[in-house]
Image (cartoon, grey):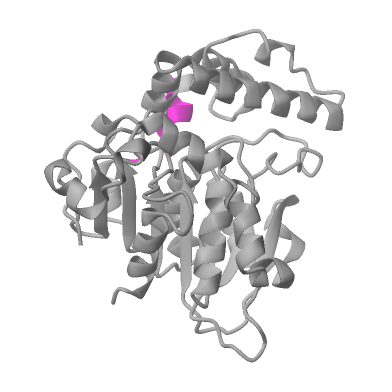
Amino acid sequence: MSTGRPDRAGDAFLPPRLLRHPQIQSILATKSPRRRRWLARDGRMEAACQPMLLDAGDGVRLAAYWSPQPPAAPPRGRVVLIHGWEGSHASSYLYSMACTVYAAGFDVLRLNLRDHGGTHHLNREFFHSARIAEVLGAIAAAPVRTADAPLYVIGFSLGGNFALRVGLHGPAAGVHPHLAIGISPAINPRATMQAIDDGPTLFRWYFTGKWRKTVQAKKAAWPELDVAHLLGERSLVAITRHFAERHTEYGALDPYFAAYTLGAAQLYASPTPLAIITAADDPVIPVADFAGLRAQGALRSFDLTRYGGHCGFFDAIAGATWAERRVLQLLDAPR
């Protein structure tokens, strides 16, 4: 497995020159026509798909899309997929990964976090990134075809942070993944927010535009909510400060960020095996967040590639991405 040294990253993933720019990789992750291509090539996962609402505990309901293998085909395991901030079960990067692991023989659950995928009406309180208990509750409530089928959790960006925390906190809540994988995971949320604010205008517009739409959708579903203070700022850090003060139990930005910041000591001591796949040129997740990390302890694999952007890892426009092929290797690796 990769040690994560950047000087060896090109040996693991080397896209053609026309695909190397991090913004191209990142845009392809969300805007590529992979869903349409998968449906044209192999629609089995979609044909097996069952929408459902999962009881996540304390009255919280989360939406999910469950695609079991055919009745005559025992699954190789269960894979739970968690999208990034303002993504959904249908996000291009997640949908393609779902099809890849489904085609490899795994049951697949695509989980929508609170207030994602058009679910603003399901729960009155806003989504926030420290809500790990309800994600664990939803996974515990998800369908299980065979009790001995191993559980794997894979997340992207903020969902990668959630996936790693499922590995960290899951066993204490009765959720026991065989492996939790974070792809381009946001392990230092303050640095991520600042990188978006300071980075390419395109990304800041993308994320702030998505945020305004979700606030407006929440207001439409729950008219009594006061959201005016969330719509006036242009900086994600400023928006999040107001949000943390008014809409989380933490009351301030620093304790809110601390609630879902992940450090090396936590990752190495996890009760669940973990893996990270990330890129040094990610325009959203600063590579400095991973300084000093290596594959040791519970962090069984750490792949830091030179290229890949944010959740990209395209070495061709068509077919599985390098990250998808790498995930299949990780799912097959002995524990």
Q: Position of residue 189 (x, y in %)?
A: 42, 30
Q: Is residue 258 left or right of residue 94?
A: left
Report if residue 182 is visible in the image: yes
| Above or below: residue 174 compared with residue 248 | below
Q: Is residue 22 left or right of residue 33?
A: left
Residue 257 in the magenta stretch? The answer is yes
Q: Is residue 17 left or right of residue 45?
A: left
Q: Main secondary structure of the magenta part?
A: helix
Q: Nearer the viewer, residue 53 or 330?
A: 330
Range of magenta residues: 254-262
Q: Position of residue 334 (x, y in %)?
A: 28, 77
Q: Nearer the viewer, residue 237 or 49?
A: 49
| Above or below: residue 143 compared with residue 323 | below
Picture quadrant where residue 40 is located: bottom right
Image quadrant where one finds the N terminus: bottom left
| Above or below: residue 315 compared with residue 202 | below
Q: What residue sits 37% from the left and 32% below the top?
A: 22
Q: Nearer the viewer, residue 277 or 140?
A: 277
Q: What residue sits 40% from the left and 27% below the top?
A: 192
Q: Position of residue 93 (x, y in %)?
A: 53, 48
Q: Residue furthest left?
A: 7
Q: Nearer the viewer, residue 312 or 275?
A: 312
Q: What residue sits 48% from the left and 15% below the top?
A: 201
Residue 93 in the magenta stretch? The answer is no
Q: Position of residue 148 (x, y in %)?
A: 50, 84
Counting the numbered discs, the total is 0
Image quadrant where one finds the C terminus: bottom left
Report if residue 259 is visible in the image: no
Q: What residue sits 57% from the left and 52% below the top?
A: 34
Q: Is residue 303 left or right of residue 246?
A: left
